[in-house]
Amino acid sequence: MSTSPPITSLEGYLESRKQLIASRDVLFSVTRMYLRPGQNPDAQLLGDRLWNSPARTISDDEWVVNAARGYMAVLANADKGRGFQLIVLQQGMELQIAVQLPAWYADPKLPQVIRFINTFGPVQPKVTNLPTDELLVEWTFSAVELYTDARAVEDAVRRIGSVFECALQSFTPTTKSPS
């Protein structure tokens, strides 16, 4: 149950919407910082086979963010070895995190796809074969306190990062890593 005062005027709605957009902007900015390769300084020491992979490098033109619509994406870049697209939607009281996989991973029985689908163990995603022969793997989480509790923001960023990391580990060839 919300403790916010009821919206009883257009001005009240517009002010609340302005705050919502600012909150989404914070979520997407924190996510962007979290996904930058500099945020994994111990990856090489921990034996991450992709610790210096170009697939981890997300250039500015590969980020698509629209806080007003609650949308963020990291575009695929096959030249870097990142053949998937990460999609985050935050609308209403839900956080949706999805990955769009290329056609060659469209079979949900492939070992890499099975590993990816099990990113959150018993929390299984919705898996959709798209008309483009691509596969969309999408998790939906409750986000009731997302913009009122810092722990909820950190949890959302952790979930987004987990999906991105599992997609990297599952679908990025090691041959794309520089020596």
Image: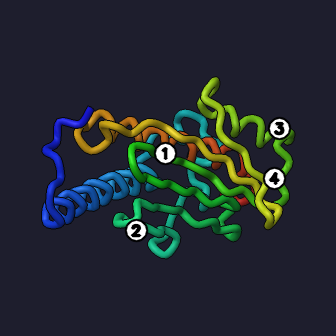
- Quadrant of the image occupied by residue 177: bottom right
Q: Secondary structure at mark 1?
A: helix
The residue to which callout 2 is attached is 66
Query: Residue 73 at x, y = what percent?
Result: 51, 62
Task: Tell me the CA gap for discs 1 and 4.
Answer: 20 Å
Badge 3 or badge 1: first in the primary sequence: 3
39 left or right of 13 in image: right
Label 2 or label 1, whichever lies nearer to me, is 2
As shown in the figure, which amino acid type bears the numbered disc 1?
Answer: Ile
Q: Which mark sits nearer the N-terminus, 3 or 4?
A: 4
Under mark 3, the amino acid is Pro
Mark 4 or mark 2, whichever is nearer to me: 2
Q: What distance separates the C-alpha of mark 3 from that of mark 1?
A: 22 Å
Question: In the drawing, what numbered circle is on residue 111?
Answer: 3
Report crowding for label 2: few under 14, some 14 to 19, many 20 or more residues within 10 A (C-alpha). Answer: some
Label for residue 105?
Answer: 4
User: Is residue 175 shown above or below 169?
Assistant: below
Q: Is residue 99 left or right of residue 41?
A: right
